[in-house]
Image (cartoon, grey):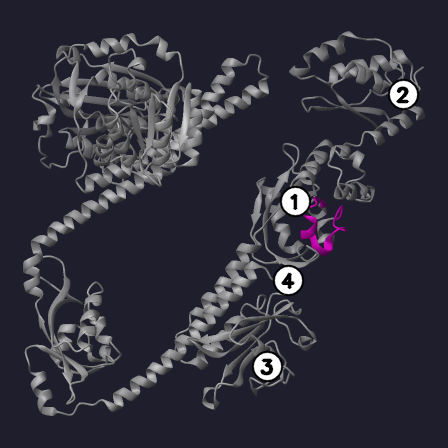
């Protein structure tokens, strides 16, 4: 007999059989499982000793099952698998005995699952909670699922609470140390209590969140619309929190909810205070009394931050030392602190504190004088009282006294709010005071200055030029009707001081002000031409600012002093328009081109740069997964699945990056088309190689989606002996990618997805290369033949055609005609189901027509579509191999055996890390420089095989750095030119030409893949040049992706 009261053979057989039948060890424990199954030695001591001896990597826990009173065993394998083993009822004479139960209970107490938690005071509080009195029961009876989520919440650094229970009306709380301060008065009784007992006031508003989470199975977020008082840092504090409820439990069942809480106090307080300040500023400067009332009314709307306030105003009529109470908030009537009138030297109320403040801010602590204040907001006294002087210019206007938020610390944010409030109050008071002063002054001047000479007035009114008379203060004393007609504004708009300046164009106002100053200084006369805000409508073109010629002179008194200014104005709008018409048209054209180029630059740089980092990271993930699978044998199945998921995710990221780049390219191409900036650059290209290169871009996507495809050259290529043709491969590639992308997108849902690609050539009738029922999207516009330019050579004219046929959904006949229009798709559901911008086919149509071709489609609904296009090219005669190309085929094995030394010049930290890591994995030794100056220093100190140079950098940009380095090469008489690749997001031809002129050997446009960059790097080094004599296909440098410049 063993110590547990059972016979050794029976207990040994039962435990051995059930362990083998109920517990399948993972692959990592294969050796241990074999040992376990092989050994059947006798037990010595308790049964757990045998389990530990036979399976040493397991963590064990024995306890008594409350329902069957039989001994059970939980074994946690090293992989994390948990199995519950229970012996069968009375099938071999194996019955639980009191001795067995006692031993199991003792072991259970020693193997407490909470012992693995951090042993903090809070964890001890959690363990010491009497859980047997809760709905969850004692800790040792908790299910593995509850233990898992309880552990997750307890060790989470964020504030979190687990609400456990199948019934939302009986959810028991388990929360962590970070959540306890947020529970405020509910802690510690909240631990183990249901929601209604812990937060009875919140249950009606929170219960719908639980209902919705349980019904949908998804997490539900809630926002911080209202603040909460929390106990932390030794005092109660106003705080705002947002978070969400996530349903958790075993698959198919919601057993509880995790509640993660995020604090957004700073943001919400800033919004509330900013709203108060904005409301303060939204008052028209009508009068000081109106503004003072507005200040108190506005502060009352933010009573949480300002629970008490009073405003005192200095009485100017009685001198500068008399204070009058203008208004208050939070004080009962006849309160002892409400002093209606007192001098600044008085000792009544709060006058002494104002006197101590002077013109500086004074903050005091709460004292008994404020005990009977009717505090607004929270209804509790403020800890700090602020005495804020209100300045009107350099003059003290009065004081604003207010209390601060009692449940917020007097920190930097509070100080900033007080400072902002002080500035805002002083600003609007000053504006109101200035308004009243100016209004009084205006009324006085209007009464003093009156013109009564009727004869002169009659002459002025009938003159053919505009005349006006202006006081030295800038007020219009008089003016004739013709003046107002030229100014384009009625007399009432000239009533204010210097109001006549408002008639002038904003760009000419400074010139008018300069003339005015010269006249006030006594210059005899001034003649000047000025533009007006009034528009002049010329014989042709759009309206433009009218122009006048002004002859102005000062009017002097008998002593020779200037007392006013007179002026005559003549309309010269038509004359100026006639003189500047041609110049203005030229300037507008130059400005339009400049803006278009600026737009292209910004979009290219700001959108391609992050895309480059995305492509690098996704490429690195995919390569890492493939390397891991290739280098590590016997990877456990779960790890293989994770690696496959990572590879799948990386491919999705790459596809999304490709999609976003195609949209960027479409937008840029459309912008160039609209502004006629799109250029066609012909180069010799092999059509077969171009097609293969484009299809290689989509090979991974085709395989992933199990799409069968074929490439069929037309016999016409052999008949016409087509080898190389001269055309723009980048534009043809852009069209081809649009068509192939659409084909893949619409063929995916098919049962047997198939894509067929054909290409051929024709001398005169290109439409014969396509089906007879092809619809051609032509607009009938005659375009110039670009192949006549010298860049195209003088070879034979050849039409090169391409078609992409898919087995997709096809098109309705009514939809075919509109798919080539701008921002149009087949129907309203196309974008929802398949995405896209509606630009691809429109741009493809424009590109084919610019290259002397057409694009069309033939489709049958439900059977698929065939999209085809052709472009006009010229034949290129075959070129013989050169000696240099033969040398490149041989290569230099000794040079290739060492690492490629690369200088990476990049100011973006993310791009430094990502691209540097990729280059190192490719076998390069990488040195990083943050800007051009560091690059020049590194080039002086070290030797490199190649330089990767970003163009836009601080301190010294890439263009200037390349110029300086090339100059150093010449000055030092170097015979070997160091290759430099400009890496940039700027894609305009002018920018690429500028980079090449500055000293770059090649330009790599972002985004790109590291493998393409390495290929370009090696092509620039003779010893590492590719063995193939055929250069990379122009326009398809990114061979592994669909990222085509």
Q: Is residue 410 above or below residue 140?
A: below
Disc 2 from disc 3: Cα separation:
91 Å
Q: Which of the marked residues, 2 or 1, is nearer the chain's N terminus?
A: 2
Give the number of the mark in front: 2 or 3: 3
Q: Which of the marked residues, 1 or 3, is nearer the chain's N terminus?
A: 1
Badge 3: how crowded within 10 Å, few (<14), some, or many (20+)? many
Visible residue check, residue 708: yes
Q: Quadrant of residue 854?
A: top left
Give the number of the mark in front: 2 or 4: 4
Give the residue at x 73% y 36%: 118
Q: Which residue is mark 3?
A: 351
Disc 1 from disc 4: Cα separation:
23 Å
The mark tally for this picture is 4
Question: Is residue 151 left or right of 952 when viewed as pictured?
Answer: right
Question: Is 520 within the magenta?
Answer: no
Picture disc at residue 160 = 1
Q: SS for tag 3?
A: helix
Residue extent of the magenta highlight: 172-193
Closest to the observer, 52 or 1008: 1008
Give the number of the mark in front: 2 or 1: 1
Badge 2: how crowded within 10 Å, few (<14), some, or many (20+)? some
Question: Is 181 within the magenta?
Answer: yes
Picture disc at residue 95 = 2
Give the number of the mark in front: 3 or 4: 3
Q: Is residue 218 above or below residue 787?
A: below
Disc 3 from disc 4: Cα separation:
27 Å
Disc 1 from disc 3: Cα separation:
50 Å
């Amino acid at each position: 007999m063993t110590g547990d009261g059972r016979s050794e053979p029976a207990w040994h057989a039962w435990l051995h059989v059930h362990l083998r039948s109920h517990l399948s060890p993972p692959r990592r424990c294969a050796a241990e499982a074999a040992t376990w199954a092989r050994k059947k030695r006798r037990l010595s001591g308790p049964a757990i000793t045998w389990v530990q001896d036979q399976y040493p990597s397991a963590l064990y826990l024995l306890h008594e099952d409350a329902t069957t009173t039989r001994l059970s065993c939980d074994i946690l394998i090293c992989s994390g698998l948990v199995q519950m083993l229970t012996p069968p009822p009375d099938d071999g004479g194996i019955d639980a005995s009191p001795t067995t139960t006692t031993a199991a209970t003792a072991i259970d107490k020693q193997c407490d699952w909470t012992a693995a938690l951090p042993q903090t005071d809070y964890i001890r509080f959690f363990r010491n909670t009497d859980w047997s009195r809760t709905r969850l029961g004692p800790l040792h009876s908790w299910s593995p699922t509850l233990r898992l989520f309880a552990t997750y919440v307890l060790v989470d650094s964020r504030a979190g609470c687990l609400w456990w229970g199948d019934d939302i009306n009986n959810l028991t709380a388990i929360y962590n140390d970070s959540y306890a301060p947020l529970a405020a008065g509910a802690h510690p009784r909240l631990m183990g209590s249901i929601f209604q007992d812990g937060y009875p006031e919140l249950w009606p508003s929170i219960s719908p969140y639980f209902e919705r989470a349980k019904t949908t199975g998804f997490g539900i977020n809630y926002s911080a619309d209202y603040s909460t008082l929390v106990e932390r840092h030794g005092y109660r504090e106003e705080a705002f929190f947002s978070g969400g409820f996530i349903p958790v439990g075993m698959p198919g069942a919601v057993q509880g909810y995790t509640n993660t809480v995020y604090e957004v106090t700073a943001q919400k307080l800033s919004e509330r205070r900013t709203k108060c300040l904005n409301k303060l500023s939204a008052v028209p400067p009508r009068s000081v009394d109106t503004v003072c009332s507005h200040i108190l009314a506005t502060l009352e709307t933010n009573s949480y931050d300002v629970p008490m306030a009073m405003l005192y105003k200095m009485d100017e009529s009685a001198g500068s030392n008399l204070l009058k109470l203008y208004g208050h908030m939070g004080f009962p009537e006849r309160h002892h602190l409400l002093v209606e009138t007192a001098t600044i030297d008085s000792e009544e109320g709060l006058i002494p504190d104002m006197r101590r403040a002077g013109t500086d801010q004074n903050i005091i602590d709460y004292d008994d004088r404020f005990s009977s204040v009717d505090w607004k907001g929270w209804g509790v006294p403020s800890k700090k009282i602020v005495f804020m002087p209100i300045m009107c210019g350099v003059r003290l206007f009065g004081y604003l006294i207010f209390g601060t938020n009692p449940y917020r610390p007097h920190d930097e944010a509070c100080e900033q709010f007080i400072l902002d409030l002080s500035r805002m109050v002083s600003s609007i008071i000053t504006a109101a005071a200035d308004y009243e002063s100016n209004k009084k002054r205006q009324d006085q001047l209007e009464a003093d200055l009156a013109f009564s000479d009727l004869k002169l007035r009659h002459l002025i009114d009938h003159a053919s030029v505009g005349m006006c008379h202006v006081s030295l203060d800038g007020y219009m004393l008089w003016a004739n009707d013709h003046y107002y007609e030229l100014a384009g504004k009625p007399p009432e708009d000239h009533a204010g001081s210097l109001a006549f300046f408002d008639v002038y164009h904003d760009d000419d106002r400074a010139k008018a002000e300069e003339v005015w100053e010269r006249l006030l200084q006594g210059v005899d006369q001034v003649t000047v031409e000025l533009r007006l805000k009034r528009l002049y409508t010329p014989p042709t073109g759009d309206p433009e600012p009218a122009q006048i010629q002004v002859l102005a002179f000062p009017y002097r008194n008998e002593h020779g002093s200037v007392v006013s200014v007179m002026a005559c104005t003549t309309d010269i709008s038509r004359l100026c328009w006639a003189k500047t018409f041609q110049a203005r048209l030229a300037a507008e054209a130059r400005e339009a081109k400049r803006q278009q180029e600026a737009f292209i630059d910004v979009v290219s740089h700001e959108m391609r740069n992050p895309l480059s980092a995305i492509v690098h990271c996704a490429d690195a993930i995919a390569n890492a997964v493939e390397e891991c699978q290739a280098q590590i044998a016997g990877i456990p199945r779960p790890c293989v699945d994770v690696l496959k998921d990572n590879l799948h995710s990386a491919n999705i990221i790459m596809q999304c990056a490709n999609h976003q780049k195609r949209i960027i390219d479409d937008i840029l191409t459309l912008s160039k088309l609209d502004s006629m900036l799109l250029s066609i650059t012909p180069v010799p290209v092999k059509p077969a190689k171009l097609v293969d290169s484009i299809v290689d871009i989509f090979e991974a996507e085709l395989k992933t989606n199990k799409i069968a495809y074929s490439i069929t050259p037309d016999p016409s290529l052999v008949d016409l002996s087509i080898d190389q043709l001269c055309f723009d491969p980048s534009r043809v590639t852009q069209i081809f990618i649009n068509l192939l992308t659409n084909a893949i997108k619409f063929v995916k849902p098919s049962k047997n997805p198939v894509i067929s690609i054909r290409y051929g050539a024709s001398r005169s009738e290109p439409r014969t290369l396509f089906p007879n029922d092809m619809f051609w999207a032509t607009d009938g516009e005659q375009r110039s033949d670009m192949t006549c330019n010298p860049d195209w050579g003088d070879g034979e004219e050849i039409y090169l055609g391409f078609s992409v046929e898919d087995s997709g959904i096809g098109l309705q006949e009514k939809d075919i005609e509109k798919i080539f229009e701008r921002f149009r798709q087949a129907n309203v559901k196309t974008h929802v189901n398949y995405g896209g911008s509606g630009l691809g086919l429109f741009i493809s149509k424009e590109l084919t027509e610019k290259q002397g071709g057409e694009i069309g489609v033939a489709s049958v609904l439900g059977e698929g579509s065939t999209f085809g296009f052709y472009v006009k090219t010229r034949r290129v005669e075959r070129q013989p191999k050169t000696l240099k190309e033969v040398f490149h085929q041989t290569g230099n094995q000794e040079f290739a055996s060492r690492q490629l030394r690369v200088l990476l010049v990049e100011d973006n930290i993310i791009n430094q890390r990502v691209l540097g890591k990729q280059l190192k994995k490719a076998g390069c030794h990488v040195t990083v420089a943050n800007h051009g100056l560091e690059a020049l220093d590194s080039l002086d100190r070290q030797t490199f095989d190649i330089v990767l140079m970003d163009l836009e950098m601080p301190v010294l940009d890439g263009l200037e750095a390349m110029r300086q380095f090339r100059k150093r090469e010449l000055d030092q008489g170097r015979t070997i030119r160091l290759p430099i690749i400009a890496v940039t997001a700027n894609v305009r031809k002018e920018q690429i030409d500028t980079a090449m002129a500055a000293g770059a050997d090649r330009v790599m446009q972002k985004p790109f893949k590291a493998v393409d960059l390495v290929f370009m790097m090696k092509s620039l080094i003779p010893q590492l040049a590719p063995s193939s004599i055929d250069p990379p296909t122009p326009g398809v440098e990114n061979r592994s992706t669909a990222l085509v410049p």
